[in-house]
Image (tube, rainbow, N blue to C red):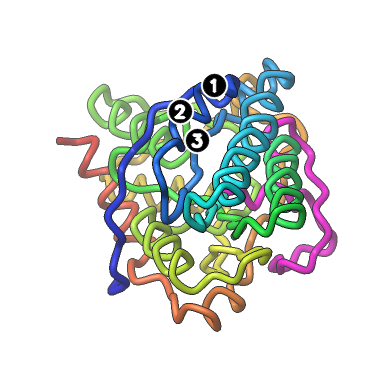
Amino acid sequence: MNSPVPACRAKDLDLRDTTSVRAAISDPLDAVVHLAALASGAEARRDPGMAWDVNAGGTARLADGLAEAKASGQGDPLLLLVSTAEVYGNVAPPRARTEADPPAPCSPYAASKLGAEVAALEAARRSLLRVVVVRTFPHTGPGQTDRYVVPAFARRLLAAKRLGAPVVKTGNLEPVRDFLDVRDVVDAYARLLQHGQSGAVYNVASGQGYSLKDIFLRLADIVGVRATPEVDSGLVRPADISHLVGDASLLQSVTGWTPALSFDQTLRDVVHAQAD
């Protein structure tokens, strides 16, 4: 991870409120890395309207504000929109997804993130605002909340070891995912800020798929516990994507990016962060 990371400032704002969005971007900006979202799939399923208002509507408000700033001479900001690989949905037979694959979201979260892409790229076509869309595949790392699968597995396995429990509750372990370390993902974003082409969409992916069962067993080995996974229907996601692996050839050709951290190292760091 050798790309220089530009100096950044975090901005507080409410994506549902136009006045709040405009206030956050009132100063001249070189770039906006837009990660703000309703990012939990479970929360989006509970309130799809909220997901659309925050993810798609909020991005529309942000992109429009940046477009107006550009038109008024307040610089030439780049909007780096962080979307999700979940916009691809399911595909048969399973294969690595490329940016040319048509989106087919199968959850309120993914649909609202695709709406965010549409909103940002429309603003780019209308105003010449510079927009780069990033479809990031699943990623994790030390400090991630256990609302997500890898730290959730780690927390349950550490508890099983502490309590001597022979069984750990899980969701469906059959889906295959392409996992990255968040530190490699940040490196990709930094490179795209410098080299990404406006109007383009880039996958951030390793190209390697792991079943959730494989991830569970790898984590169990790191924790040092023998525990049997047991599927709990309450933890199973409806309409889950069975295979989500990406092809990042375009990103690699434009920026030279490749993942620097092995998946096993990432898993070890997640476990050690929780154990500490």
Left or right: 219 as drawn, with respect to 195 = left
Amino acid residing under circle 2 = Ala
Magenta run includes residue 265: no
Residue drawn at point x = 68 percent, y = 37 percent: 60
Q: CA distance from mark 1 to mark 3?
A: 16 Å
The residue to which callout 3 is attached is: 36
SS of the residue at dot 2?
helix
Q: Nearer the viewer, residue 105 or 186?
A: 186
Where residue 85 sits: x, y (%)? 64, 52
Q: Amino acid at mark 1?
A: Thr
Quadrant hosting residue 265 = bottom left
Comparing 271 with 24, the one in front is 24
Q: Secondary structure at mark 1?
A: helix
Nearer the observer: mark 3 or 2; the answer is 2
* Stretch of the chain drawn in magenta: 82-110
Residue in front for this viewpoint, 145 or 110: 110
